[in-house]
Image: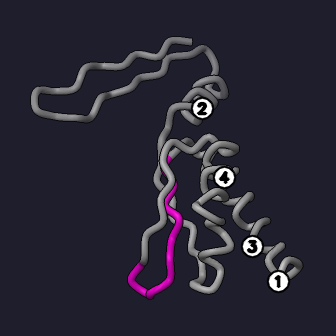
Amino acid sequence: MLIQVDKASVGGDKRKITIYGKFENDVEAATEEILIERAFISIENHLLEYVCGYNDANLEFFQGKSSVVQLAVEQNHTGNFDIVAVGTRTSVEDLRSMVQTHINLFGRYQ
């Protein structure tokens, strides 16, 4: 397996990444490991404090356990809030699962 990263063009901030491998499965697995995506997880207003936790302790826990690179809360156009996550597809999926599980437990802890 060979991963080649070309330098950014002059004035550009994007780099070209090329992955070479014997088998397509290996190349796909390597791609999953380096592909970064941005995801939005919608949170209803009445759940915002519960999801974020005291002094954002839950957000810090979610970020640490899911290994997302960046985690923030932003208000969307509907007036509700989104958790904005940046990370690999696997880490974002882990984060979605953790947040959804946390929301599902909300009724038990009221």
Mark 4 or 3 closer to N-term?
4
Q: Nearer the viewer, mark 4 or mark 1?
A: 1
Q: Residue 54 is drawn in which quadrant?
A: bottom right
> What is the spatial separation of the Cα atoms under label 1 and label 3, in whole angstroms?
12 Å
Q: Which residues are magenta?
A: 76-86
Percent across and percent down for residue 109 are 85, 77
Q: Reading the chain from its start, which is encountered first: label 2 or label 3?
A: 2
Q: Earlier in the sequence, mark 4 or mark 1?
A: 4
* Separation of marks 4 and 3 at Cα, in angstroms: 13 Å
Q: Position of residue 66 (x, y in %)?
A: 66, 45
Any magenta on residue 85? yes
Q: Which residue is label 1 attached to?
A: 110
Marks 4 & 3, CB-CB < 8 Å contact = no
Give the SS element for disc 1.
loop
Q: Which comes before the other along the chain, label 1 or label 3?
A: 3
Q: Nearer the viewer, mark 2 or mark 1?
A: 1
* Amino acid at dot 3: Ile
Residue corresponding to mark 2: 28
* Residue position marked by numbered label 3 in the rendering: 103
- The 10 Å Cα crowd at callout 3, few under 14, some 14 to 19, many 20 or more, is some
83 in magenta: yes
Tell me which amino acid carries mark 1: Gln
Question: Dot 4 surroundings within 10 Å: few (below 14), some, or many (20 or more)?
Answer: many
| Quarter of image, res 7 | top left
Q: Is residue 60 above or below residue 21?
A: below
- Mark 3, secondary structure of its residue: helix
Q: Is residue 91 above or below residue 103?
A: above
Q: CA distance from mark 4 to mark 1?
A: 21 Å
Q: Gap in Å between the C-alphas at discs 2 and 4?
A: 26 Å
At horizontal 44% and vertical 87% (from top left) the residue drawn is: 78
Instruction: List the residue tagged with mark 4.
Output: 62
Q: Are marks 1 and 3 in contact (CB under 8 Å)?
A: no
